[in-house]
Amino acid sequence: MINLIGYSEQKLKQLFADWGVPSYRVNQVFSWVYHRGTKQFNDMTNLSKDLRARLADHFYIALPRIAHKTQSRDGSIKYLFELENGSQVESVWMPDGARKTLCISSQVGCRLACSFCLTGTLGLKSNLTAGEIIGQYLAVNEDLPEADHATNVVMMGMGEPLDNYDAVCDALRLMVSPEAMRISNRKVTLSTAGLVDRIRQFAQEDIHINLAISLNATEDSTRDAIMPINKRYPIKTLIDCLKKYPLKPTRRITFEYVLLKGINDSDEDAVRLGKLLSTLRCKINLIPFNGFEGSCYEAPSEERVKSFQNHLISKKYSAFIRKSRGTDILGACGQLAAQAMTC
């Protein structure tokens, strides 16, 4: 039996063709599953009894189980999900007026071992399936009132999305498909630590979502120390790749820069960052480090962060200080995995 959540549109159309079923029936099935939250095939009343029976013989419909949820003082909610194999991952729902952003995970743990990220301390346990990835979105929306349903999705939770390439691409196609989940591709963002070969491959996919790069340093010596992946894909290699990344006229690449006191937050770092990104259409999110137990890093002072931002603004960059959400529940950027380890 296969979980229909996450099963690709292309595969379902092919299966229906093999069964002699018109392709428009796929749209009807997806509407029941992704928009009405139907879990039983017998409830899909605009399908024939025979098709409902065949679907029930091949598929089941299930979402990740919400094992625990914790609400922050700022209104954010961290969800701990238990997967079918017993593994656990986290998602964070973050409200900001009409905008409701859901940060979802793509792996249990992560093999990249970025030293400022708690998830990296776990190592890679397993990859999520496409169904487990989009299931986080569906389960959170099912848990919340309709007015609070996620409007934006960021793949910035546990794991490196491009290290789970096929499942992530399958999940993203379903998210933005007008026949499946119908999320605007402008409201979906994938964040990567810079797997250059995979970025090149992703550029050729028919998935035109937003791309974010976790950069965090302006010199290879620093980035090598805090992000071991830089030893394989150094900064120049990454930037040269991004210069060729296809962007629609109104799109920009987002660069995420976690500010670590005394490590990458100097005036010289700000100057180098401005020069490094000068040939790219981009915006910059500055993220003061979010601490966790056992970390050797600290966040810079507000004055230092503001000074860093001001230099970038003076060079005509769109540079923002990203407000950390859910820090009191270990739900902010770089803090995911604690709940999964302790609950």
Image: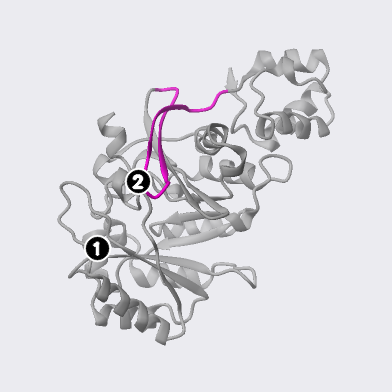
According to the picture, the residue beneath numbered tag 1 turns out to be 224
Give the residue furthest to the bottom: 314
Secondary structure type for disc 2: loop
State left or right for residue 70 relative to residue 65. Answer: left
Q: Residue at x 69, y 39 (%)?
A: 180
Compared to 264, does 233 lie above or below? above
Magenta-span inclusion, residue 4: no
Asked whether 146 or 286 is in front, the reply is: 146
Any part of residue 70 in sight: yes
Image quarter of residue 297: bottom left
Any part of residue 208 in sight: no
State left or right for residue 18 relative to residue 315. Answer: right
Of labels 1 and 2, earlier in sequence is 1
Q: Residue at x 59, y 67 (%)?
A: 246
Give the residue furthest to the front: 73
Residue 68 x/y as whole percent: 38, 29
Work out which quarter of the rendered image holds the N terminus and state it. top right
Magenta-span inclusion, residue 76: yes
Q: Where residue 266 is drawn, which disc sits there? A: none
Start-end of magenta stretch: 62-85
Asked whether 66 or 15 is in front, the reply is: 66
Image quarter of residue 186: bottom right
Residue 279 x/y as whole percent: 48, 81
Amino acid type indicated by mark 2: Gly
Q: CA distance from mark 1 to mark 2?
A: 26 Å
Q: Local crowd at mark 2 within 10 Å, few (<14), some, or many (≥20)?
A: many
According to the picture, the residue beneath numbered tag 2 turns out to be 331
